[in-house]
Amino acid sequence: MYGFNFLDQYIKEKRYPTKFELDEISHGHKVIVFAASMHGNAYSSKVDEIASVPEGFPGVEVDKKGNPTGVYTSDDATFYAQNNIWGSFSDDEIWKFVQDCADYAVTQGVTSIHGLFGQFVEGDRDVDIVLARKDQLPIDLTVFHQTWEPEEAARRGLKRVGGCLTLDGAAFEHTMACFTPYTDRPELRGMLYHSDEEVYDFISKAHARNMQCTMHAVGERAIDQLLYTYLRVFSEQGRKDIRHRLEHFCLPTDEQIQMAKELDIILSMQPSFSYFWDGAGQEFANVVGRKRADRMDPFHKIIEKGITVLSGSDAPVAPIQPLTYLAHCVSGYNQVRNISVTEAIKMCTVNAAYANGEEKQKGSLEVGKTADMAVISKDPYEAAAAGEILEMEVLATIKDGRIIYRKAPV
Ligand SMILES: [Zn+2]
């Protein structure tokens, strides 16, 4: 059994449940509690045995007696555990996850997905499974191989490498790397997981191989690390039209937005984050303070600069629901990030196609392009003007001219 979207701030005790507590209520079943960000987990004993994270690993929580509690809060521990857990699934079971995800995406008007694989299954077996079977899916799947070895991705015939290779962690685990301390934990300002040299080694190898690359950088210090690495590599090897990306870019400074523009880096962002965690619950503000929460997901400033920005879900961190996030970008409650309907549509259409080098085939409705489209229940411009943009629904999804989803009549 899985539970997603756990935040300790929602719980009276302000902490994860321990394996002893999960065992008491799970009757021997395997239970995983995923943090909202997926950067922390709690397991029942049965799962914890499979996870088999060594004691003394960074991010392994222990109780007052020094016994591990089955709670993991660093990327090191969480990713190690996930490797063993997902690695215990068969090829067919892993493929079923991918199929279910694609089938759900179709109901949300999606015709292409940029998917991140590797890093969470031993030997990156999932990458080989999806590459062998992805043509069976109803939609297009672009595979990003999450490996620190660009040659590994190249060996698999891929033109791109990286994804959520985490330079820092996430806000709620206090691992998002900030310049200044967390508001609720003044002794912490996040973690940088890798040295500048490691990041440079990765980007310079990928760039030399003409491979598009991307990495996970959420907080200011991680964003700095990646942008300055791109700058160094470009100055050494020259720029190329490879369209490098940066995943998340949640808490940038104005200078970093300017630098991303100058380096022509594509920003792959997730409006889902501020949609879910910067609303009435004030979840982000509770950890970083209101002032910094207002600086998160600054779509307005980014688009004003003319940067190519994408709208993603980070699924399974958040569900694949592009229409919801489109609406949030237009009329979210926090004015600091709101943008026009046209720009919000571009984030999940033309910009996404451009990021993939597919702008001649996809992204807009034009003669000669692939007939990939979604039919939606309202004109988004009229819906926005009428304050009804969050009520838009997908009525049908068309892939390559063929209807692959039609909403059942009510
Ligand atoms: Zn990530």
Image (tube, helix red, strand yellow):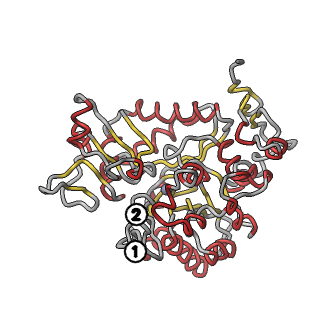
**Residue 12 horizontal/vertical position (percent):** 35, 48
- Helix, strand or loop for disc 2: loop
Disc ID at residue 344:
none
Quadrant including the C terminus: top right
Q: In the figure, is residue 371 to the left or right of 115?
A: right
Instruction: Give me the residue at 44% from left, 76% from top.
Output: 196
Q: Which residue is mark 2?
A: 174
Q: Residue at x 27, y 30 (%)?
A: 29
Circle 1 Cα neighbour tier, 10 Å, few/some/many (<14 / 14–19 / ≥20) = few
Front residue of 64/260: it is 64
| 47 left or right of 12 in image | left
Report, in whole angstroms, how far the alpha carbon at label 1 lies from the one at label 2. Answer: 19 Å
| Rendering quarter of residue 59 | bottom left
Find residue 195 and name its label. Answer: 1
Structural crowding at the residue carrying mark 2, measured as other residues with C-alpha within 10 Å and reported as few (<14), some (14–19) or many (≥20): many
User: Of all residues shown, which one is farthest toward the right?
Assistant: 367
